[in-house]
Amino acid sequence: MPNHDRNSRDSASQTNFYEEISNKIIAELEAGCVPWVQPWGSAAVKAPLAMPENAATRRRYSGINVLILWSAVIERGFSSQSWVTFRQALSLGGHVRKGERGTTIVYADRFVPEEEKKRAIETGDEAQAVPFLKRFTAFNTDQCADLNAKSSAAPTPLPHMIEPQVEALIGASGIDFRIGGNKAFYCPSEDYVQVPPSAAYFEPINWHRTALHELAHASGHSSRLNRDLSGAFGTQKYAFEEIIAEISAAFCCASLGIVPSVRHADYIGSWLKALHEDNRAIVRAAAQASKVADYLLGFLPDAAAATTAQPADCEAA
């Protein structure tokens, strides 16, 4: 098959994936359900609150795969947050039960084709990497039989209370964190976070959720993860950054055993607008959110953040 035909087919496959995921997220938001906030702990949910992980490697999934796998756990009533591929189930001494339907997850990266390498050498230009997207099928361990006991064990619980860990994270981050006023915000121009005192929140845990959200914004400073924070309120850039902060806070919360919540429910309209205008926005935002969560959780004294699993996010797409 000619290269241009194969490239065209691969491009169409990527576009279809983005459309499938984006349309699903849009439908959930329009129905009033926020994909990164699931009803953990309710009678209808069997699985524990946790980040999804690979049962064979014990590494966590990241990016859009977290939202995909969380959604599958809720929709299909799984009791586990652990996943394997068909071959991994066999390597663990078990197998996927006959007739089980897997969940599609993805791995994205970039590579430089040989033709591009030659062109760059001839012209003296920098070689341009080409994004690629590969789909994988994952099965929840509920869908498998005879896996060894270790592979199906629940994630190890964190050794400390939630609140001290968040407060330790704030202190270790080095971010200028101020308590006061009646609004929570991050000021990019002066690089500081301000959050009202905990007494201002009906539930104290909401103070910690809010702190993680604002720290997520602060992670974008040029001295840290260097994201574009120039978007004014009401713009697509602003909405995109809010999605990143919302999802990363949810990932941090889930990693720490805090049930995620929506910090800015009134922003759903702007999120929808951003997703309608760019069908890759949610995939890119989720990839950035994983980077933010890994960055922030890396400040925990006990290094509670786990290593990201592959296939993971779609950062390169």
Image: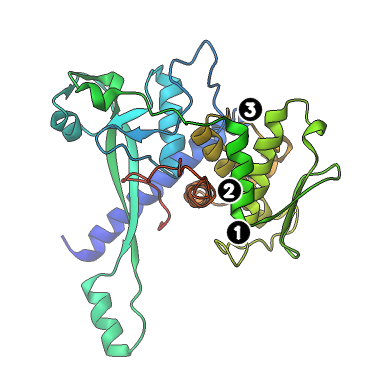
* Residue at which label 2 appears: 244
- Whether residue 272 is visible to the viewer of this picture, yes or no, is no
Look at label 1 and name its amino acid.
Answer: Gly
- Whether residue 130 is visible to the viewer of this picture, yes or no, is yes
Q: Nearer the viewer, mark 1 or mark 3?
A: 1
Tell me whether the residue at label 1 lies in contact with that at label 3, contact meaning CB atoms closer than 8 angstroms. no
Left or right: residue 90 versus residue 59 is left
Q: Mark 2 vs mark 3: which is more N-terminal?
A: 3
Image quadrant assignment for residue 267: top right
Look at label 2 and name its amino acid.
Answer: Ile
| Residue at 38% across, 18% down | 79
| Residue at 60% across, 56% down | 219
Task: Work out whether residue 11 or residue 257 is closer to the camera in this orientation and state it.
Answer: 257
* Residue at which label 1 appears: 220
Which percent across, then down, holds residue 97?
19, 19
Look at label 3 and name its amino acid.
Answer: Gly
Name above or below for residue 285 compared with residue 259. below
Q: Within 10 angstroms of label 1, few (less than 14), some, or many (20 or more) residues? A: many
Secondary element at tag 1: loop
- The answer for how far apart the CA atoms under marks 2 and 1 are is 10 Å
Which percent across, then down, holds residue 10?
29, 54
Q: Within 10 angstroms of label 3, few (less than 14), some, or many (20 or more) residues? A: few
- The answer for how far apart the CA atoms under marks 2 and 3 are is 19 Å
Tell me whether the residue at label 2 lies in contact with that at label 1, contact meaning CB atoms closer than 8 angstroms. yes
| Residue at 44% across, 34% down | 51
* Residue at which label 3 appears: 32
Secondary element at tag 3: loop
Q: How is the image coloured?
A: rainbow
- The answer for how far apart the CA atoms under marks 1 and 3 are is 28 Å
Name above or below for residue 188 compared with residue 194. below
Q: Nearer the viewer, mark 2 or mark 3?
A: 2
